[in-house]
Image (spheres, rainbow, N blue to C red):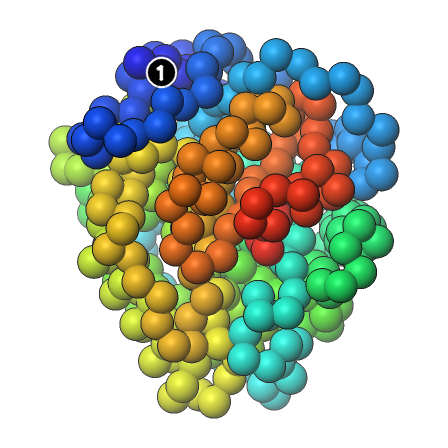
Amino acid sequence: MIVVLALVVGGAVALPRLGDTSPRGDERPQMTPISVGVANSVRATPTPSASPEATIAPTLTPTIVPPLTPLIAARAVGMRASEPTPTPIPPTATPKPIVANGPLLTSRLVTFYGHPDNNRLGILGEFATPAAMIAKLKAQTAAYQVADPSRPAIPTIELIASVASDTPGDDGLYLNRTRLSLIEEYADIAARNDCLLLLDIQLGYDSIASEVGRLAPILKRSNVHLAIDPEFHVKHGQVPGEEFGSVTAAEVNGAAKMLADIATQNGITDKVLVIHQFRFDMLPDKENIKPIPHVQIAVVMDGFGGPGAKSENYTTFIHNELIQYGGIKLFYKQDKPLMTPADIIALDPSPLVVIYQ
């Protein structure tokens, strides 16, 4: 049994949790042992400690734990789902697709994750200006271009579009929604800087279909794609951050169908659909998730730890259960040592979505 520990930043509440409990039969691979520990808190104006070409120290004893999301701090970054949804700002022009027929056919996405209004939710909020963030993102992306010249690397922004909360709100959905005007602003920033925008949804009690429907006007842009974080999609009676959530294959397939319709009806580049995973029970019937035309599905192995543990878990969740494309998430502060672009590219299959938090 794997024991993990999560931390709610702001309330400093340690939440012990049991490991993977979803029934999958005797064929389940043994997971890398996970240590119990608490990550350092984020400084007010942190600077990522690892440069793209940093020299890697000898491998430490493999440990990997789930990512920590400070739900209490998240209250300040969005609006309650029950509040009126702003009218989206229509784009003045349709951005030219960066790569025809879907970026993952020929390219690799290198992504910065988080929320621009809060530096506790990831690296995206740790910069004084969007320009500073773009400069750092492009430097990290360039390291992958050097490591693998055969596959162009596209800088990508992963913005949390709906943030799970530890309180229900008036509608009882345990969810804060990022204002659409801010999402539109970052879609424009991404387009001006030849970047993609990946909208991450955490859900709470809301449905995938509801969140995708809300974001549909922005997803009509060629440079905007979708990510689903099952960790915070919990059952009624549970609280995000206190219990691990999940999404079903039917929900994922429904989201893929909505994205395919957006792509075909608007004559735009095929959509990328990213799904985060670090436990089996986050995707309990994963084998029923099926690729469809006009959508590229990439499961991203989440969680932080040493290179050995991350590589083993990548084999478990991606190589052994490959749906279409593989991806991996890296943590500048918690991964000790941080895997290099060469380390990442050498994984099998080579990750085509690389996310930094």
Residue 122 placed where, x, y %? 59, 38
What residue sits 55% from the left and 37% below the top? 121
Q: Image quarter for residue 98?
A: bottom right
Question: Can residue 349 be seen?
Answer: yes
**Of residues 182 and 52, the one drawn nearer to the viewer in this rendering:** 52
**Helix, strand or loop for disc 1:** loop
Observer-nearest residue: 194 or 147?
147
Residue hosting label 1: 2
Q: Is residue 189 visible?
A: no
User: Considering depth in this image, is 24 or 336 the residue closer to the camera?
Assistant: 24
Where residue 233 appears, as percent x and y from the top left, is 28, 42
The residue at 60%/81% (across/down) is: 100
Q: Choose between 357 and 86: the one closer to the eye.
A: 357
Residue farthest to the front, as pictured? 27
Q: Residues within 10 Å of mark 1 (few under 14, many from 20)?
A: some
Image height check: is 351 above or below 213? above
Question: The residue under label 1 is which amino acid type?
Answer: Ile
Q: Is residue 327 left or right of residue 165?
A: right
Q: Residue at x 43, y 81 (%)?
A: 263
Q: Which quadrant is the C terminus positioned in?
A: top right
In which quarter of the view is residue 93 placed?
bottom right
Tell whether 233 sits left or right of 296.
Answer: left
Image quadrant holding the N terminus, namely top left
